Image (cartoon, rainbow, N blue to C red):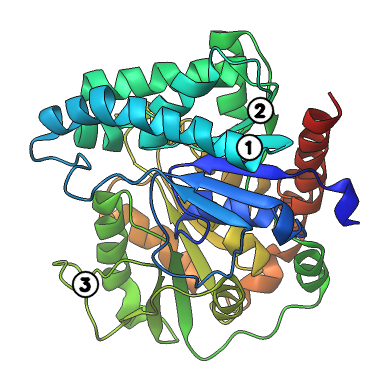
Amino acid sequence: MPASFPKLLVATEFPPNAAGGGAAIVRQMLKGWPVEKLFWWSCQPERHQQFGQKTAAHAVATISAKLYPHHRARGPKCWVLENLWTPWAARHFQKTLDTFQPEAVWVIPHCWSIPPLAQALLHSPRRFHVSIHDYADVQGAVERFGAAQSRRLSDNCDRLYARATTRDVICQPMADDLLARTGVAGAVNRAGLEPEDFAALETVPTAAGETIRIAYAGTIIVEKEFALFVVALQKIRAQLRRPLTLEFFGDHSYRGRAWFDASWMRENGILTASELSAALKACTWGFSPMALTDDNPRYNQFSFPAKFTSYLAAGLPIITLGHPACTVVKMASAHYVGVCSSATTADALAKELSAALTEPDSRRKYQANLLRCARQEFDADRMRRALHENFRRQRAE
């Protein structure tokens, strides 16, 4: 009933209908939340309404695209954002709180939302829940913002985590790491399977199609490993009994890459959640890579790609590639949900892929393991109920 839902403000960098795994998790966890009780604060405006997430109101502390740090002039841009924009954005956030008067606040500290949220909340008596999806000092952030700025973002993120009333993270290794460093425990909350996904996963899988379709959902983060995967596939395509395609789903185009081959690769663009689910179910395998070295441990060891869950929900066995310390490799190894490889050469990887892709009915082979993994690790309804209870506790206390 609507009366049981507190008036909630989501505070983060991205808008309600942003692309990407973090935004998808937030939308899934908000399933069933009354629109009239949902408010949003972000640093980025909406670009589209494609995902259908509606709010009662959305306040934006806009960062100019020209001012957002990437590689060029990142030092001066970071200085301006930290010293001039952040104080204004913190006041903007406080004004948003005063205007909307939320009964519960959900903070997802991401990139440049971190400084104003920290400035406004760390010394405030306000209660809030925090969700950490990625560490703020992963290598990609260091490359965009510089090492010193990334450390400051990370320190403030840790302080928000420790200061929060309740908290959750994307995977158990991150929860363990934050407990060791901050002294406070957090739950695990990430993209999961809905009851209808479990029901579909329990049914007898459909027979394999005439084409082996390998899905890749989202942005390519580890392009060196992705290129290695492509080379390995090229080595075995002619040997396979069925034709093979590599299917891309997401907001980015890779047609300009040297490894892209339009004769067997297809870009499907950005799809709604229901469209993506249907498209993935028509595929044969899902591909989930991370780095084959541990040079970026803050990402490898403590992040978890949402695409892994999307493949589970579609009933796809998963080709996992990465260093043995990667969270996703550990998950895939523990549950045997497909091919799990740490091969560093195309020949070695091709040998492993050849054995897997000649499997006549991979979906049926891995069905029981996919279902067991999903129930143990990715129950969306269970995670959502726990999160909503934390929001209700904010109102009650």
For mark 2, does the 10 Å Cα neighbourhood hold few (<14), some (14 to 19), or many (20 or more) residues?
A: many
Mark 2 to mark 1: distance in Å?
6 Å
For residue 9, what is the image quadrant?
Answer: top right
In the image shown, does 67 or 217 lie closer to the viewer?
Answer: 67
Quadrant where the C terminus sits is: top right
Give me the disc on residue 128.
2
Residue at 64%, 21% in the rendered image? 164
The three-letter code of the residue at mark 2 reads Phe
Splitting the image into 4 quarters, where does residue 263 fall? bottom left
Secondary element type, mark 1: strand
Instruction: Check if mark 1's residue and mark 3's residue have beta carbons within 8 Å.
Output: no
Mark 1 vs mark 3: in front = 1
How many discs mark residues in the rendered view? 3
Using the image as rendered, state which of residue 69 and residue 123 is in the foreground: 123
Mark 3 and mark 2: Cα distance apart in space: 45 Å
Horizontal and vertical percent position of residue 304? 52, 42
**Tag 3–tag 2 contact (CB < 8 Å):** no
Q: Position of residue 32 (x, y in %)?
A: 77, 60
Residue 292 in view: yes
Q: Which residue is identified by label 3?
A: 260
**Residue 271 shown left or right of residue 140 in the figure:** right
Relative to the observer, which residue lies in front, 343 or 188?
188
Q: Name the residue under label 1.
A: 106
- Mark 3 / mark 2, whichever is N-terminal: 2
Q: Earlier in the sequence, mark 2 or mark 1?
A: 1
